[in-house]
Every structure is written in C-alpha cells, then in structure tokens.
Image (tube, rainbow, N blue to C red):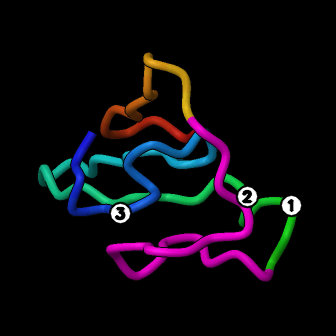
Amino acid sequence: MDPRNGLCAGCHNSRIITNRRGSRFTMCERSRADPSFPRYPNLPVLACRGYEPANPDHTEIEPGTEP
C-alpha cells in the first residue's frame, strides 16, 4: 500500500496493476460498472464518493494477468 495514492491506498475497489516492464498503476474496479469513475485515476485521490475501506489483504495483480 502506497500512501502517495491517497484514498486509493486503502480502498477495497483499488487494484495495483503491474505490467511486464515493471510499471505499476492503480486501477479503480468501480470503473467497470460505473463509467463516472476513471479506470486509472490521477493520484493522489483525496476525495472519492466510491471509497470503501479495504481489508488487510490488498490485492495486487501480477504481470500478464487480467483482473
């Protein structure tokens, strides 16, 4: 969890995507069902109507896998 991501760092709807080159991106899972949420929000996110506190095992997606 990276505190520089703002609310996304502790949000249940946030996923860290790592590409094959090692770059990491924060993806908002809410964007799948609601287009008003950006798929990859500009960080840090300081306010979000879709924020839900995450459980302790924050999920990270490995390169080459689709969430």
Q: Is residue 45 left or right of residue 2?
A: right
Secondary structure at badge 3 equals loop
Relative vertical location of residue 23 with respect to residue 56 in this rendering, above or below: below
Provide the residue designation for mark 1: 33
Number of the label disc, if any, that sits on residue 6: 3
Percent coordinates x, y for residue 66 in the rendering: 54, 41
Q: Which residues are magenta?
A: 36-53
**Mark nearer the viewer, 2 or 3:** 3
The quadrant in which the N terminus is found is: top left
Q: Residue at x 54, y 45 (%)?
A: 11
The crowding category of the residue bearing disc 2, from other C-alpha atoms within 10 Å (few below 14, some 14 to 19, many at least 20), is some
Relative vertical location of residue 23 with respect to residue 35 in this rendering, above or below: above
Q: Residue at x 34, y 75 (%)?
A: 43
Relative vertical location of residue 52 with respect to residue 4 in this rendering, above or below: above
Q: Are marks 2 and 3 in contact (CB under 8 Å)?
A: no
Q: Earlier in the sequence, mark 2 or mark 3?
A: 3
Q: Is residue 7 left or right of residue 43?
A: right
Number of the label disc, if any, that sits on residue 30: 2
The crowding category of the residue bearing disc 3, from other C-alpha atoms within 10 Å (few below 14, some 14 to 19, many at least 20), is some
**Main SS category, magenta section:** loop
Which residue is more in the foreground, 43 or 7? Answer: 7
What amino acid type should be assigned to the residue bearing mark 2? Arg
